[in-house]
Amino acid sequence: MTTPPLPPTVRSAALARPRGIDHIVAGVSTSDGDGVKLTRVLQQPLQQRLDPFLMLDAFGSDNPGDYIGGFPNHPHRGFETVTYMIAGRMRHRDSAGHEGLLSNGGVQWMTAGRGLVHSELPEQEEGVMEGFQLWLNLPAKDKMCEPGYRDIQSDEIPEFTTAAGVRVRVIAGESHGVAGAVRRPRTEPLYLDLTLPPGAEFIQPLAPEHNALVYVFRESVWIGGSEVPTRRMAILDNDPGSDGIALRAGATNHSPARALLIAGRPLREPIAQYGPFVMNTREQVMQAVHDFQNGRFG
Ligand code: CO
């Protein structure tokens, strides 16, 4: 078997000082929308720690009763929602006139900005529905920007395989010289979906001040001397001397491990949240509620 040639950056040397795990989080089972069962992995008390990320939900079920209600019309203001569908079909509609079908492997990147009302409803009555929704904060100066929306189909997400056989999908940011589908200048989000054969290692350079998490959703992954099991989020430390993260799939795994690696530059601005409104002050949140109630969300 021959190894295909790789761009030089993929052969980058090992890290001098990889990050370790700060702590591991299980998340809580809850439901949202019209009874959609999900695990809230990143909850409100972790928003400062994982700034600029505000929320991470994981959903996954083959029981239609757990997802069929979907997320009927609801508002957002002040941040971005990133929905990544592993399996299933979901229809998006919003008050700015955007509509799109999110399906297997696709991403929907919505900038709520000054506000919109949208719905996310399943377009399937049976089968597996699995995916993630991440909330990414907007800097204060952009919170009232024009709402935006982008549907990124699965084949538009840049993908590569490392020499070790790790498949990398680059949803946002840059990895090994491959630019992702989305770039954001201020928060510089990195969003990777990694599939790692048993024992395979993956390395990603990372600025030490960027907050980072790894969410494992198949098998297990090792970071330093600690194992991160399925359906757990590892929050990585911010050791100022560190130069990135090295993760390795468990050598005894029976099938490839799969994990999200998410990192970003913290905004270090006050966070005021009330449900689907995330602003900087309580007054701004009250204004959002008032504007929504008075039909000023498009
Ligand atoms: Co929503």
Image (cartoon, rainbow, N blue to C red):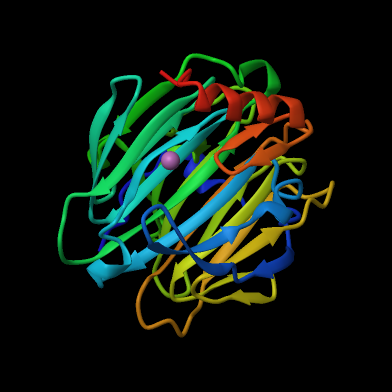
Q: Residue at x 70, y 58 (%)?
A: 236
As displayed, is residue 216 above or below residue 294?
below
Q: Is residue 14 among what the camera can see?
A: no
As displayed, is residue 200 above or below residue 143?
below
- Left or right: residue 8 versus residue 128 is right
- Left or right: residue 224 versus residue 203 is right
Q: Residue at x 59, y 35 (%)?
A: 277
As displayed, is residue 165 above or below residue 75?
below
Q: Position of residue 153 (x, y in %)?
A: 25, 37
In the picture as drawn, the residue positioned furthest to the front comes out as 294
Q: Quadrant of residue 268?
A: top right
- Left or right: residue 92 versus residue 287 is left
Image-quarter location of ligand 1: top left
Q: Residue at x 76, y 44 (%)?
A: 208
Q: Which quadrant of the rendered structure holds the C terminus?
A: top left
**Of residues 252 and 137, which is closer to you in this image?**
137
